[in-house]
C-alpha cells in the first residue's frame, strides 16, 4: 500500500493544462509584436543616447588620426625641405671655404713672391754696397802700394843715382818727377 500511496500523492497531469500553456516553438503574434516593439524602442534609445556618441567619438578619432597623418606628412615635407636647405647651405659653405682657401693660398703666394723679390733686392743692394766698398778698398790699397812702391823706388834711386848721375842729371830727373806727380800724391796720366 505504500507504493500505491506514493503514486497517489503525485498529481495527475491535466490534459487541459497542456492546451493552455504556450509552446516554446510555437508562433505567438502578440509576442512577436512586443519583441519588435521592444527592439525598436531599444534601438531608438541606444541610437540616440549611445550610437550617436560612439559614432561621434569614432569620427573624432578618425579626424584626429587624419590630422596626425597630415601633420606627419607636413613634418616629413618640412624635414625634406630642411635637409635640402641644409645641403644647399653646406654646399655653399664648402664653396665659400674653398674660395677663401684659394684666396688665402693666392695671397700667400703673392706674399712669398714679394718677400723673395725684397730679399733679392736686399741681396743686390748689399752686393752693390760690398762691390763699392771693395772698389774703394782696392783703390786705397793700390794707392798705398803705389806710394810704398814709389817711396821704395825713390829710396833705391836716391841711393843708386848719386853715384851714377851728375848733378845736372839728378836735378832734371827731380824736376820731371815733380811735374808728373800731383799735389794729392797721384801721378798725372
Image (spheres, helix red, strand yellow):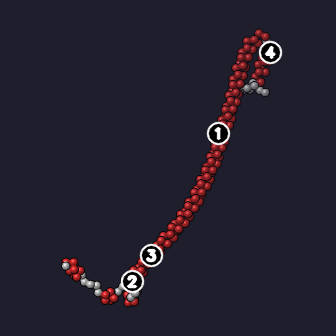
- State which tag comes first along the sequence, 4 or 1: 1
* Front residue of 68 and 155: 68
- State which tag comes first along the sequence, 4 or 3: 3
Tell me where residue 61 sits by quadrant: bottom left
Total labels drawn: 4
Reading the image, the residue beneath label 1 is: 119
Reading the image, the residue beneath label 4 is: 169
Reading the image, the residue beneath label 2 is: 25
**Residue located 68% across and 28% down the image:** 137
Q: In which quarter of the image is the C terminus?
A: top right
| Disc 2 versus disc 1: nearer the observer | 2
- State which tag comes first along the sequence, 2 or 1: 2
Between the C-alphas of marks 4 and 3, the distance is 151 Å
Reading the image, the residue beneath label 3 is: 58
Q: Which mark is residue 4?
A: none
Outermost residue on the front side: it is 1
Amino acid at each position: 500500500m505504500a507504493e500505491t500511496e506514493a503514486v497517489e500523492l503525485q498529481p495527475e497531469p491535466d490534459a487541459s493544462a497542456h492546451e493552455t500553456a504556450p509552446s516554446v516553438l510555437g508562433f505567438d503574434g502578440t509576442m512577436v509584436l512586443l519583441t519588435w516593439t521592444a527592439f525598436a524602442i531599444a534601438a531608438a534609445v541606444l541610437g540616440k543616447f549611445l550610437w550617436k556618441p560612439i559614432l561621434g567619438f569614432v569620427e573624432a578619432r578618425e579626424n584626429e588620426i587624419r590630422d596626425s597623418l597630415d601633420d606627419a606628412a607636413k613634418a616629413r615635407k618640412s624635414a625634406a625641405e630642411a635637409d635640402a636647405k641644409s645641403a644647399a647651405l653646406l654646399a655653399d659653405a664648402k664653396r665659400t671655404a674653398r674660395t677663401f682657401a684659394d684666396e688665402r693660398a693666392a695671397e700667400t703666394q703673392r706674399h712669398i713672391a714679394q718677400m723673395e723679390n725684397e730679399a733679392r733686392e736686399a741681396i743686390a743692394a748689399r752686393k752693390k754696397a760690398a762691390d763699392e766698398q771693395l772698389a774703394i778698398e782696392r783703390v786705397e790699397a793700390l794707392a798705398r802700394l803705389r806710394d810704398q812702391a814709389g817711396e821704395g823706388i825713390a829710396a833705391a834711386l836716391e841711393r843708386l843715382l848719386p853715384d851714377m848721375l851728375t848733378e845736372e842729371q839728378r836735378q832734371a830727373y827731380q824736376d820731371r818727377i815733380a811735374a808728373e806727380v800731383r799735389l794729392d800724391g797721384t801721378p798725372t796720366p
